[in-house]
Amino acid sequence: MKNQAIGCLLACLLMACLHPGCSSDGGGDVGNKDASDLQTALETTVPCGGCEPGTYCNFDQCEPSSVSMPQDAAPHECRIEWWYYTGHLTDGTGQWGFEIALFEQRVSDLLPDIPNDGMGYMCHVAILDEVAKDHVFTENGSFEPKSWSSDPVDLQVLNCHLEISGDGHDRIRGRIPVGEEGHDDPGDWGFDLQLDTTKPLIHHGGNGIIPMSEEGGDSWYYSYTRLAAQGTLTTPDGDRPVTGQAWMDHQWGEFDSSMFLGWDWWSMQFDDGWEIMLFQFRDWTGELVTQAGTLVDPDGNITAIEGMGAFQITSLREWKSPHSDGAYPLDWDIVIPEMDWKLESRALFDDQEVPNFVKTYWEGSVTITGTRGDTPVTGVGFTELTGYAESTLGLI
């Protein structure tokens, strides 16, 4: 029963893995621009003349928000929380994608005697060789973080280490040690990256809160959708100096993720400075029950994409995993009618699944082409698919 309880608990930890109050403790070329050019091009946000605390500037108006920085960068006293970074890197010849995700989940309801105020933790690290089409990852859980500080925000669990500034200037370190590589890919992998935002904080839902469902509660949710990345990528062939761009999500809340079979999530970074985030939840019958997202213009202004039918996503094919029983919908046509976006998002390669003892999922690098009105657009992104495969414990 104890092992079953641990599995269910940690399943809850990853079940929320789309990204979600609580109190605070304290593809192709990488954008066709290097990080410095991109930062210069995007540092054009329109000042509001000074917004009061608890508000932020959007389309030259001060709007209310439930997210308050830098304190909300730190861990909160709530049921579930995670910090999530993805991105695309290059050394001038090779190209790589990366993922690092750190989860915290209250587990004391089922395991009252565990340490650290009844919290459990998970760390996921993945590196994608986008040229060789190879996917290396490691994932595991712990009840004992190596560090968990709110001032400064320094979070370290197993192979994940995040130093978070609260103003979009973070250092992230992920490692895939020899012997811990998924799919038995040999070698020592890792990254040590400095990330610096080129755009303002993005408040999803307009005020920093998104509904998970009528029954499932709300999630606090913010992002830095355009981070310039610079640092070192470690491969079995040695260290490489890399640059690129990244995306950061932070979510927390008291919501009940067991309301959902799974979710689909897209982050998109376009070469002309726009970004889009979309997500949709599926109930236990497989029907879509929630759709929402955020459109971010080059100046950092946001437009909420709200309501069922606000966008349509059609998968063109299915990939069956050789590592699990998973059958994933891949290669998506995306239409946002009201905003006149028509996009083709394509998986860079198929085998980007993370078989996991708690919740197996697909986390993949994608390339994007399409139109915004009459304007052609291109970009890169990541897609997350859950609820399509059993975990190695037989959970879904």
Image: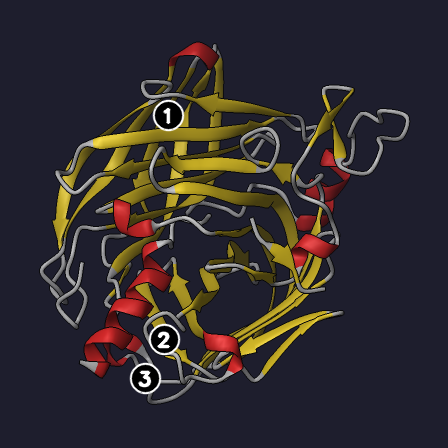
State the SS at label 2.
strand
- The amino acid sitting under disc 1 is Leu
Residue shown at 32% from the left, 73% from the top: 110
Asked whether disc 3 touches disc 1, contact meaning CB atoms under 8 Å apart, the reply is: no
Q: Secondary structure at mark 1?
A: strand
Q: Is residue 320 above or below residue 157?
A: above
Query: In the image, which is nearer the foreground, mark 2 or mark 3?
Result: 2
Q: Which mark is residue 186?
A: 3
Question: Going 31% across and 65% down the picture, which residue do you hit?
Answer: 134
Quickly name the residue at label 1.
343
Circles 1 and 2: CB atoms closer than 8 Å:
no
Q: Nearer the viewer, residue 108 or 46?
A: 108
Residue 344, by quadrant, is top left
261 relative position to 160: left or right: left
**Circles 2, 3 touching at the beta carbon (< 8 Å):** no
Marks 2 and 3, the one that precedes in the sequence: 2
User: Which residue: 61% across, 36% down?
Assistant: 203
Res. 294 in view: yes
- Asked if residue 232 shows in the view, the reply is no
- The first of marks 1 and 2 along the sequence is 2
Image quadrant where one finds the C terminus: bottom left
Neighbourhood count class around disc 3 (C-alpha, 10 Å): few under 14, some 14–19, many 20 upward: some
The label on residue 138 is 2
Disc 3 is placed on an element classified as loop
Disc 3 marks which amino acid?
A: Pro
Q: Quadrant of the N terminus?
A: bottom left
Give 53 or 103, whichever is nearer the viewer: 53
User: Rounded to the nearest whole Å, what is the CA distance between mark 2 and mark 3?
Assistant: 12 Å
| Mark 1 and mark 2: Cα distance apart in space | 32 Å
